[in-house]
């Protein structure tokens, strides 16, 4: 016999001293995730379109900011390069940047479709591709994509959004399949409705509007960003070392019912 | 440093198996108090003694999960010894590898009784205490064979698919009662249950070859998932299927 079928374990969560890129880090789930990782000793490249992303970097030598459009190839290249140049490695990528759109299907314009796909899918693809290339060299890495319950079920008036999240789920699986031999894991979190400021610029009653979806979740409430950050952190860490290609529903039972 | 499961009392079935033991060890390391159960007359008691020597607060009892009376007795013992129950981890399971025509009725019935009925009986017996906890978690061990067909082990597939759906309805039923219910779907994990196959075929075992990570998982790669689901870190996760298979079902 004498096969080492399953190699010896690495203790702990493996986060201390590791390096992560987090997109859409200026607010919401991205900000909560950046804070969670930082508190576990992870060095960060935080990326966002918004200038607020620089505030995060001002608070610590272990955080550097990239301001840019997640959908642009150069942003992905720059963020990945920053991790390697500033911190010497890249262990974790959290593809969190995303937009939503609520519009009846027949009214959805070409621009609507393209914009959603560019941010939600193309941006994630570009960042994952760049990260994969770096992770492949060291033979290790974890990619965590932030999806939605619409990874697996449809949202009325959310055609472009749902299609983008479904695409992200399938992309995640292929990254996992190809990454397996290189020590690169990829998983996607599929959250329910989350209480963030994502709709603050779109409607005055944004928080009440989000909370009105509580009853659609069997658990009877919507999620807090920190509850999603916990799952992202788990999937980024060695605690999930045999998980890859998984769609992890964090939705208070939404898709169970 | 406070453990992730500090203050929680857990009951683990099948605690002497590969996944059960790894789960018990990690649970006590994270500060849980644990009732270790299995069908043996010795093994879970020996495990309990070992963990207690290492400083854990544990007890053990004999529990055939297919017996409603055994469940009633086990939960009562938990109440007497620990005074509460916050986490139920259903790990106990058996497998026969026969397919549709080669399975006889007694084998079928036994697999269903342990894997499927045992999971329901456990939730039924434990639920009053779990509800009283106010912040409880049930983790039911299904399998990737509760998601895909292998062409063998007919009763096992049926039972693990049942565990998957039983979990979802329980999650919906108790979602506002403070009890989360989730299923874990391990892929190929190097445990005694499949040791004969691993010994014979090693890394050429068909499912390991098809696993993108190209190896079997270790029991201590399932136990952190159990800890995660038992703890408040997973506070918005209920009714979910957590697949831990090295990517096997991703293609």
Image (cartoon, coloured by chain):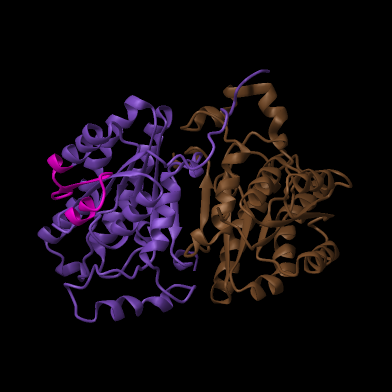
Residue A118: image x %, image y %?
Answer: 17, 51
**Of A59 and B103, the residue lying toward us:** A59
Tell me: residue B199, above or below residue B33.
Answer: above
Q: Is residue A254 magenta?
A: no
Decide if residue B103 is on the left or right side of residue A171. right
Tell me: residue A18, above or below residue A248.
Answer: above
Decide if residue B87 is on the left or right side of residue A226. right
Decide if residue A180 is on the left or right side of residue A117. right
The residue at the far right in this view is B41
Q: Which residues are magenta?
A: A53-75
Q: Is residue A72 magenta?
A: yes
- What color is chain B drawn in? brown
- What color is chain A drawn in? purple
Please tell me how many numbered marks the rendered image carries.
Answer: 0
For the point 78% across and 66% down, the residue is: B75
Tell me: residue B180, above or below residue A204.
Answer: above
Residue B51: image x %, image y %?
Answer: 75, 46
Figure quadrant of residue B58: bottom right
The residue at the far top in this view is A1
Decide if residue A252 is on the left or right side of residue A28. right
Observer able to see residue A179: yes
Residue B61: image x %, image y %?
Answer: 84, 55
**Of A227 and B39, the residue lying toward us:** A227
For the point 52% across and 27% down, the residue is: B209
> Quadrant of the image for the C terminus of chain B?
top left
Observer able to see residue A152: no
Residue B79: image x %, image y %?
Answer: 78, 69
**Of A27 and B19, the residue lying toward us:** A27
For the point 77% across and 48% down, the residue is: B52
């Amino acid at each position: 016999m004498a096969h080492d079928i399953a190699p010896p374990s690495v203790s702990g969560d493996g986060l201390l001293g590791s390096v992560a890129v987090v997109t859409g880090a200026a607010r919401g789930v991205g900000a909560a995730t950046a804070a969670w990782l930082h508190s576990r000793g992870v060095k960060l490249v935080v990326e966002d379109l918004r200038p607020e992303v620089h505030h995060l970097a001002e608070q610590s030598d272990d955080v550097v900011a990239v301001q840019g459009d997640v959908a642009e190839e150069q942003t992905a290249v720059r963020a990945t390069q920053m991790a390697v140049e500033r911190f010497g490695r890249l262990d974790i990528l959290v593809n969190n940047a995303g937009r939503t759109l609520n519009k009846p299907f027949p009214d959805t314009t070409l621009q609507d479709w393209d914009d959603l796909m560019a941010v939600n899918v193309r941006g994630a693809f570009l960042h994952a591709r760049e990260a994969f290339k770096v992770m492949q060299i060291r033979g290790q890495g974890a990619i965590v994509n932030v999806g939605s319950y619409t990874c697996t079920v449809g949202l009325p008036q959310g055609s472009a959004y749902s299609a983008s999240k479904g695409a992200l789920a399938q992309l995640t699986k292929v990254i996992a399949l190809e990454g397996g031999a290189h020590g690169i894991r990829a998983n996607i979190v599929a959250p329910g409705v989350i209480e963030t400021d994502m709709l603050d610029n779109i409607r005055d009653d944004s928080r009440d509007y989000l909370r009105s979806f509580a009853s659609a979740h069997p658990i009877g409430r919507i999620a807090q960003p920190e509850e999603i950050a916990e799952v992202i952190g788990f999937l980024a860490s060695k605690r999930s070392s045999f998980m890859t290609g998984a769609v992890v529903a964090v939705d208070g039972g939404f898709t169970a019912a | 440093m406070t453990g992730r499961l500090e203050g929680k009392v857990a009951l683990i079935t099948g605690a002497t198996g590969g996944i059960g033991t790894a789960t018990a060890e990690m649970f006590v390391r994270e500060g849980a108090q644990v009732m270790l159960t299995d069908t043996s007359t010795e093994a879970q008691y020996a495990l309990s003694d070992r963990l207690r020597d290492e400083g854990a607060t544990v007890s053990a009892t004999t529990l055939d999960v297919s017996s409603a009376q055994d469940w009633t007795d086990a939960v009562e013992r938990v109440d007497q010894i620990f005074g509460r129950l916050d986490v139920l981890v259903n790990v106990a399971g058996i497998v026969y590898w026969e397919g549709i025509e080669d399975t006889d009725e007694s084998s079928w019935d036994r697999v269903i009784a342990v894997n499927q009925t045992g999971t329901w009986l456990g939730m039924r017996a434990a639920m009053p205490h779990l509800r009283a906890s106010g912040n409880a978690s049930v983790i039911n061990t299904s399998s990737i064979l509760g998601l895909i067909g292998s062409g063998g082990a007919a009763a096992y597939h049926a039972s693990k698919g049942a565990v998957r759906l039983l979990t979802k309805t329980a999650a919906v039923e108790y979602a506002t009662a403070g009890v989360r219910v989730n299923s874990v779907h391990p892929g190929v994990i190097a445990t005694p249950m499949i040791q004969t196959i691993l010994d014979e075929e090693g890394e050429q075992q068909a499912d390991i070859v098809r696993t993108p990570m190209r190896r079997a998982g270790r029991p201590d790669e399932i136990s952190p998932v159990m800890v995660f689901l038992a703890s408040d870190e997973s506070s918005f996760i209920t009714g979910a299927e957590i697949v831990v298979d090295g990517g096997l079902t991703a293609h």
